Image (spheres, rainbow, N blue to C red):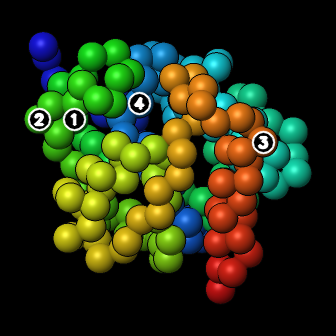
Amino acid sequence: MTPVVHPFLPVYDAASRVLILGTMPSPVSRAQAFYYAHPRNRFWPILAAVFGEPPPVSKENRIRFVLSRHIALWDVLASCVIDGAADHTIKNPEPNDFAPLLRAAKITRVFTTGNKAFTLYTRLCFPHTGLAATPLPSTSPANQRMSFDDLVTAYRVIKAATETVP
């Protein structure tokens, strides 16, 4: 298998304080060049519910939505070998370099969307960033064991983290 290289940039600005990390964009997200783009991925509806807003639909509105709440988006991996979107198939993971983002934004909290992202971040990135991550459940359509309401409850820690931002 050929390695997949992360095809688009992180979303952040100088006001970003909370960083949400996935593992690697799915094939649908890579094709649309944006995070959590699969129509059945529950990330955007969940994040919108957490903040009491309608889900943003366009890429531009999604960028505005997260940046207005001091949230940055990226993925743990710069490249890896992966079968489709199946995190459990990841081989040869290469982490993103978080140094430029951390210099530009004063990130105080890191959250991961799924256990694989948490495990990879903790092993490959934490030694360089010094910022511990909090794992959240995956919003992927493959994670059907958690209801929408349970995911919203789990993701409320993001809103709390953005409200305590200096």
Residue drawn at point x = 64 percent, y = 72 percent:
161
Q: Give the CA distance from mark 1 to mark 3.
A: 32 Å
Tell me which numbered mark, 2 or 4, is placed earlier along the sequence: 4
Q: Label 2 vs label 4: CA separation?
A: 16 Å
The residue under label 1 is 79
Q: Residue furthest bottom?
A: 166
Mark nearest the camera among 3 and 2 is 3
Task: State which mark lies toward you, 2 or 4.
Answer: 2
Label 2, label 1: how many angstroms apart (C-alpha)? 8 Å
Q: Which residue is mark 4?
A: 25
Q: Nearer the viewer, residue 92 or 88?
A: 88
Location of the C terminus (image quadrant): bottom right
Name the amino acid, label 3: Asp
Q: CA distance from mark 4 to mark 3?
A: 24 Å
Q: Is the C-beta separation of discs 3 and 2 under 8 Å?
A: no
Q: Earlier in the sequence, mark 3 or mark 2?
A: 2
* Total residue callouts: 4
Indicate the secondary structure of the residue bearing disc 1: strand
Residue corresponding to mark 3:
149
Q: Nearer the viewer, mark 1 or mark 3?
A: 3
| Front position among marks 4 and 3 | 3
